[in-house]
């Protein structure tokens, strides 16, 4: 149920942040400048390539190697198997879960090879390694034929399509891709989300419509210890504060090492943004960018956000927040739920089972969305998308373009999409008496999330809301989470998620120089202020640094893209 490669993604500040080492987050003003110079040089080079391409007046096809699909015996019909009569080999790279087996050893990928006569030489890298290497790879002369779980940003797609590294996939749809064509014809919103400014589609989507990703951060409390300290499940932010104080003072764990609350800011599902909302009166999310009444709001420059951060520092000074919250990765964080003796009183995560294990999950319960200091309950809505770009791309060196596009089109058959997401039929999925694909229970000692990351290749796929009614049942834990979201979160949504807007190339150029620098500044300052305090003294200088980094231009771009999105949405309705 947890989207692939997100459970293991963290954006935690890498340097430990005890008070005596807060210097680790200083020197902020110097970093954006050097990075801008580097990026300007990179983008300038890309721009020269694009200008050279324009001056030569060549079509995109002129930059590709000739398509040799016909020489391999390409089938007459786009949905025929095998796709080619003579076996061919293509190369692939991209990001994978750290838990996955080598892709070439996966049952599903071996099945694809047998059915299609297309062998893929998989060179998949863990997400952090791939993120470091992808641009060097794409700038080299030794390109893979395809990218899987591409991790390409919009700016990178713009750059590598302009210099013809990436192939416009839509040129192959009519003759080779009946599943993709049907999906995009039925869902113009998906087509719009993956279409670049020039009208072409360079990456394919991953779609999973369960309604869960807007609310990834669930807060769990140890109910045994609530009983031990004589308190009920909190319903307000002040009651939570008092409960954490009681945990710390009375130590119902009996270990002398009780951690009242732990989290990982910037992770997929372990963020304390609802505490910010309860104290400050404003929703927040990882991007610190929300939508209210169709207007883009940058939360981390508001007085409401400032108040929430001040209160988190109070909690930290009182010893209520795990001192490793700003330095731990997911592995270290999850280990805290499985210590020999329970020591963690409250934590944020997608689900309790994965965090503490089946033997302890009954000790923890979901804390409801808490009433803030003004009495209002606010659930922060993330910008996580159910329609994601970048699941698949093809490069100009691929020798079997039509064949590969028929191969990837098979991923958008709803049954195959389900297997890409959860694993192969007979291993993780089976047909129930109604003909629906359903989960096979995971083996004892293994969570469904862990199993999924080991056997499901992810990548290009689509499981729409309709498919969840007609093709595949949600995982049991997904069904439970749907009920929890409906009962505890949806009613209190305090903002809209930022939709999958499309930027112009000029906007992408500017964002590539601004967005990550703003994000870095906020992450560093947030950690510094929660741990060491001082937000009042630093605030005016911080706001000036944001403006110097380009915040106003960044939000101007986001608002323009948002306006275009809503204009198109209104025109379709």
Image: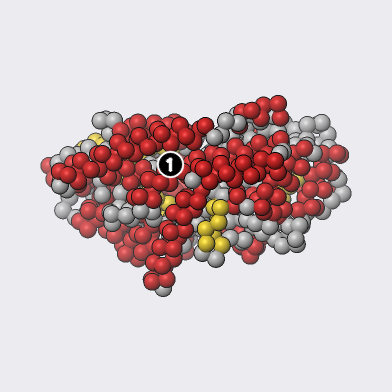
Q: Nearer the viewer, residue 195 or 392?
A: 195
Residue 231 is situated, as x and y percent measured from the top left of the image, at: 84, 51
Q: Is residue 568 visible?
A: yes
Instruction: Give the residue displayed 34% in from the left and 45% down from the top.
Output: 157
Q: Quadrant of the C terminus?
A: bottom left
Residue 56 is situated, as x and y percent measured from the top left of the image, at: 15, 43
Image position of 479 (left or right of 314): left
**303 lies above or below 533:** below
Instruction: Give the residue displayed 64% in from the left and 28% down from the top.
Output: 23
Q: Is residue 459 visible?
A: no
Q: Nearer the viewer, residue 207 or 52?
A: 52
Which element carries disc 1, helix, strand or loop?
helix
Colouring style = secondary structure
Instruction: Give the residue displayed 17% in from the left and 44% down from the top.
Output: 55
**567 lies above or below 399:** below
Image position of 91 (left or right of 239): left
Residue 500 is situated, as x and y percent measured from the top left of the image, at: 44, 56
Count of residue discs: 1
Q: Nearer the viewer, residue 85 or 241?
A: 241
Q: Which residue is mark 1?
A: 513
Farthest residue to the top: give it: 20
Instruction: Give the residue displayed 54% in from the left and 48% down from the top.
Output: 287
Farthest residue to the bottom: give it: 573
Farthest residue to the left: give it: 71
Residue 236 is situated, as x and y percent measured from the top left of the image, at: 77, 56
Report crowding for label 1: few under 14, some 14 to 19, many 20 or more residues within 10 A (C-alpha): many
Image position of 469 (left or right of 267): left
Occupied quadrant, residue 212? bottom right
């Amino acid at each position: 149920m947890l989207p692939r490669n997100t459970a293991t993604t963290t954006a935690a500040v890498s340097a430990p942040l005890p008070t005596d080492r807060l210097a680790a987050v200083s020197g902020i003003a110097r970093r954006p400048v050097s990075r801008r110079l580097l990026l300007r040089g990179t983008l300038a080079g890309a721009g020269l390539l694009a200008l050279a391409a324009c001056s030569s007046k060549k079509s995109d096809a002129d930059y590709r190697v000739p398509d040799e699909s016909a020489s391999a015996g390409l089938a007459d019909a786009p949905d025929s198997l095998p796709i080619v009569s003579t076996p061919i080999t293509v190369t692939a790279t991209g990001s994978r879960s750290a838990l996955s087996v080598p892709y070439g050893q996966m049952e599903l990928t071996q099945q694809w090879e047998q059915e299609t006569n297309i062998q893929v030489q998989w060179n998949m890298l863990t997400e952090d390694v791939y993120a470091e290497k992808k641009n060097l790879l794409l700038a080299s002369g030794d390109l893979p034929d395809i990218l899987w779980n591409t991790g390409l940003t919009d700016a990178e797609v713009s750059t590598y399509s302009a210099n013809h590294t990436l192939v416009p996939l839509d040129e192959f749809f009519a003759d080779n891709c009946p599943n993709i064509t049907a999906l995009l014809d039925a869902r113009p919103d998906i087509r719009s989300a993956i279409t670049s400014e020039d009208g072409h589609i360079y990456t394919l989507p991953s779609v999973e419509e369960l309604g869960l990703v807007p609310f990834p951060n669930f807060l769990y409390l140890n109910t045994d210890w609530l009983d031990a300290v004589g308190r009920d499940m909190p319903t307000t932010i002040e009651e939570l504060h008092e409960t954490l104080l009681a945990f710390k003072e009375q130590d119902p764990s009996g270990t002398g090492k009780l951690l009242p609350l732990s989290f990982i800011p910037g992770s997929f599902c372990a963020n304390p943004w609802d505490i910010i909302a309860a104290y400050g009166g404003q929703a927040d999310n990882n991007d610190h960018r929300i939508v209210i009444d169709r207007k883009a709001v940058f939360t981390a420059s508001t007085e409401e956000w400032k108040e929430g951060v001040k209160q988190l520092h109070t909690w930290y000074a009182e010893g209520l927040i795990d001192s490793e919250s700003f330095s731990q990765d997911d592995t270290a964080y999850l280990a805290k739920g499985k210590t020999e003796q329970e020591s963690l009183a409250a934590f944020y995560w997608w689900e309790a089972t994965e965090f503490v294990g089946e033997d302890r999950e009954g000790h923890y319960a979901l804390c409801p969305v808490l009433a803030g200091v003004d009495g209002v309950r606010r659930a922060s809505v993330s910008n996580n998308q159910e329609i994601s770009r970048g699941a698949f791309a093809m490069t100009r060196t691929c020798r079997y373009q039509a064949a590969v596009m028929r191969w990837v089109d098979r991923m958008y058959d709803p049954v195959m999409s389900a297997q890409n997401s959860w694993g192969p039929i007979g291993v993780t999925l089976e047909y129930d008496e109604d003909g629906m694909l359903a989960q096979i229970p995971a083996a004892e000692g293994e969570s469904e999330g862990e199993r999924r990351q080991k056997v499901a290749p992810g990548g290009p796929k689509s499981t729409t809301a309709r498919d969840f009614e007609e093709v595949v049942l949600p995982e049991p834990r997904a069904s439970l989470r749907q009920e929890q979201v409906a009962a505890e979160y949806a009613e209190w949504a305090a903002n809209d998620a930022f939709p999958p807007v499309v930027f112009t190339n000029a906007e992408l150029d500017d964002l590539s120089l601004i967005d990550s620098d703003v994000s870095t500044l906020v992450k560093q300052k947030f950690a510094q202020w929660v741990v060491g305090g001082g937000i009042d003294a630093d605030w005016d200088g911080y706001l000036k640094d944001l403006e110097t980094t380009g915040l106003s231009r960044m939000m101007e771009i986001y608002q323009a893209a948002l306006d275009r999105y809503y204009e198109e949405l209104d025109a379709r309705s």
